[in-house]
Image (spheres, rainbow, N blue to C red):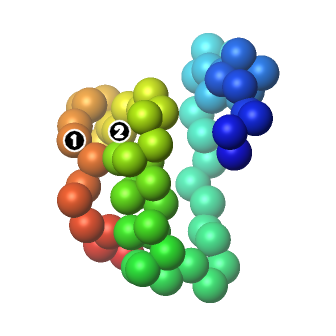
């Protein structure tokens, strides 16, 4: 999505404005699909942050779902 601008979407991810993001289930998504997402995030140059609870940590090398 090269035309998606963070400035246009960032409020949807602001916990103070929107609350926490809900847990979601992506029907039919496989471990291979999630690995593709992880790989895309790593290679895209996008800014990202991965948290487990309140702890900021590295994005897992492999999808485990």
Give me the residue at 38% from left, 32% from top: 49
In this orientation, does residue 62 appear?
yes
- Left or right, 51 with respect to 41, comes to left
Label 2 to label 1, Cα distance in Å? 6 Å
Label pair 2/1, CB-CB below 8 angstroms: yes
Q: Secondary structure at mark 1?
A: loop
Quarter of the image with the N terminus in it? top right
Neighbour tally class for label 1: few under 14, some 14-19, many 20 plus, Cα within 10 Å: few
Q: Nearer the viewer, residue 45 or 11?
A: 45
Camera sees residue 18: no
Q: Image quadrant of residue 62? A: bottom left
Q: Position of residue 55 (x, y in %)?
A: 24, 32
Q: Nearer the viewer, residue 55 or 31?
A: 31
- Expressed as whole percent of the image width and height from the top left, the position of residue 28 reads 62, 84
Whether residue 41 sits left or right of residue 10 in the image: it is left
Task: Indicate left or right for 53 with 2 as reference.
Answer: left
Image spot of residue 52 (x, y percent): 30, 43
Residue highlighted by disc 1: 58
- Badge 2 is on which residue? 50
């Amino acid at each position: 999505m090269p035309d998606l601008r963070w400035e246009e979407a960032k409020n949807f991810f602001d916990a103070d404005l929107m609350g926490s993001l809900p847990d979601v289930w992506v029907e039919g998504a496989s471990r291979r699909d999630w690995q593709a997402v992880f790989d895309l995030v790593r290679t895209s140059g996008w800014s990202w942050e991965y948290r487990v609870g309140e702890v900021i940590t590295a994005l897992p090398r492999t999808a485990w779902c």
